[in-house]
Amino acid sequence: MAIRQEHREKFEKQGRRLTMHHLRLDNMSPDEKKEIVEWLEEKDHETENIESIRFRWTMIAAVVASLGAWVAAWPVLKGWFVN
């Protein structure tokens, strides 16, 4: 079911918490209830995507930092094992 534009704007204006509160109150038509559930699922999906992207960038930064530390420590480690 597609979310009607006026409801989408209403949900965006209310925000996630207030929209969830209205869903818990259960004082709306079944169609609007379905639209709220769909809108909340969309927001959950968007949040998961953002968190996934942040996690990937954090992992990339950690790998680059560890490689940099390895390169910086190599002369010292080489000196320990050669002598």
Image (cartoon, rainbow, N blue to C red):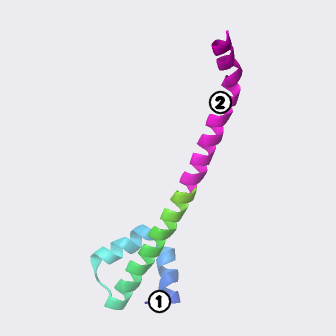
Q: Position of residue 9 (x, y in %)?
A: 52, 81
Q: Position of residue 45 (x, y in %)?
A: 47, 69
Q: Is residue 57 above or below residue 43?
A: above
Q: Nearer the viewer, residue 13 or 67?
A: 67
Quadrant the C terminus occupies: top right
Q: Is residue 38 left or right of residue 23?
A: right
Residue 15 shows in this picture: no
How many C-alpha atoms fall within 10 Å of the one at disc 2: few (<14), some, or many (≥20)? Answer: few
Q: Is residue 30 left or right of residue 40?
A: left
Q: Is residue 38 left or right of residue 73?
A: left
Q: Is residue 6 above or below residue 42?
A: below
Residue depicted at x 51% and y 68%: 46
How many C-alpha atoms fall within 10 Å of the one at disc 1: few (<14), some, or many (≥20)? Answer: few
Q: Main secondary structure of the magenta part?
A: helix
Question: Which residue extends farthest top?
Answer: 83
User: Is disc 2 placed on a helix, strand or loop?
Assistant: helix
Q: Is residue 73 magenta?
A: yes
- Residue matched to label 2: 69
Residue depicted at x 68% and y 24%: 74
Residue depicted at x 47% and y 87%: 3
Residue depicted at x 34% and y 71%: 21
- Residue type at tag 2: Ala
Which span of residues is magenta-colored? Answer: 54-83
Numbered disc in front, either 2 or 1? 2
